[in-house]
Amino acid sequence: MHEKGLVKDTASVDYAAALSKSLLFYEAQRSGKLPPEQRVQWRGDSALSDGQEAGVDLVGGYYDAGDNVKFGLPMAFTVTMLSWSVVEFGPQIKARNELANALAAVKWGTDYLIKAHPEPNVLYGQLFDFATKYTGLYQNSIPDAAEFYKSSGYEDELLWAAAWLARATNDNSYVEFLTKNVNSGTSSMFSWDDKNVGAQVLVTKGILEQKYSGYGSLGQLKTSAEQFICNCIQKGNSNTRRTGAGLLWFGDWNNLQYVTSTSFIIAAYADILTATSSTLQCAQGGARPEDLIAFARSQVDYILGTTPKQMSYMVGVGSNYPKRVHHRGASIVSIKIDAIPVACEAGFDEWFHRDADNPNVLDGAVVGGLNQGDECSDTRDNYQQAEAATANNAPFVGVLALLAS
């Protein structure tokens, strides 16, 4: 049946299987020397000399998406969202026997990020003390990243870092930083580039738990978080657009990265409201925790196949899912089947343009997804919709764990 265009068929959605595969995807994205317990068997070791030219060990970490490149900015967001999934929904993840896999996914990323900070004031990413002293855009320090992950500003990263450090350390200096640096307003999305909503929700949690004052600057952060959520659940003053079938729509390029991150924010906020016996008041009516979870579920169900075309946008979930994902590793025969090396151009000539499904199934990958007309073409050259990314999956882990419980 339909409600405002959203197709409903939740009986066929297997959240537990989707949770398992969402974590399995990270093993397909591993860079470096693969461990003995590696489950994605078509993958092999890769990029074992990273950092040698600079005399530093930078082996490991994750390829961000389908093109075998590592970028620190989205990797840091990915690892943080995986960690937040465990922090917020750890018991639910454990109940599905996936906690060890979730922690392994986090550790694979953090081990690399630790390597990337070999000494004070030398790093291949950003840490809070360094970032506050040497402010600037990510791509100004790493120009080659600008074409792929161009940061729109650094202020949100500082708020995000301060909010997490305040929670982890109970050091009031981070709370003071948050109080003095409120200028974010209400965001239109939550992503690797705009982390304001995440910081705002963390502050709101502290306010509702009566750890922080709800007045003044911190209260503004809480208001901004609530306005974002109200807009997404269609009860705000500036509601987020949706497709005809009810999916939140933020843009043509990798729309589902924003849907998964927003679904996490809504689910986490519902968890906070439940724990503090609170409700959300929006411009167009109130929302209880169960209302927020129902909305998050509607978005998850769409991604997992309750769409007009009954198409799942997570690889390996359901019977109808993307078979030609824009992903070099998945689209070229495994070295364990054919040991002949495939050069870069040969990968394009022999495999990228091949009119056949990928030889390797990229289980758990959430692709970019739909346009506003609920249309998506499953072709490798359609990188805006058919490419998977680590940032797409990380928030999804927590939401799936909640729904599977």
Image (cartoon, helix red, strand yellow):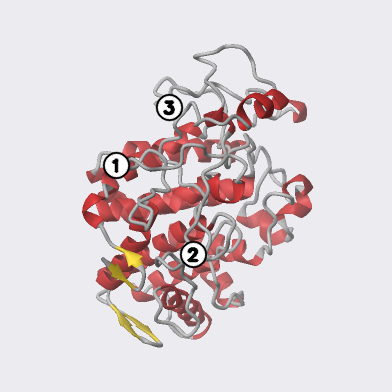
Residues tagged 2 and 3 counted as in contact (Cβ below 8 A): no
Taking 77 as reference, is 206 left or right?
left
Identify the amino acid type marked 3: Val
User: Which quadrant, please, contains the N terminus?
Assistant: bottom left
Q: Quadrant of residue 116?
A: top right
What secondary structure is marked by label 2? helix
Residue found 40% across the figure and 52% down from its top: 396
- Which residue carries the number 3 mark? 40
Q: Is residue 3 above or below residue 78?
A: below
Residue found 78% across the figure and 54% down from its top: 140
Q: Quadrant of residue 113?
A: top right
- Which residue carries the number 1 mark? 17
Q: Where residue 305 sits: x, y (%)?
A: 35, 51
Identify the amino acid type marked 1: Ala
Residue found 63% across the figure and 23% down from its top: 48
Which label was assigned to residue 198?
2
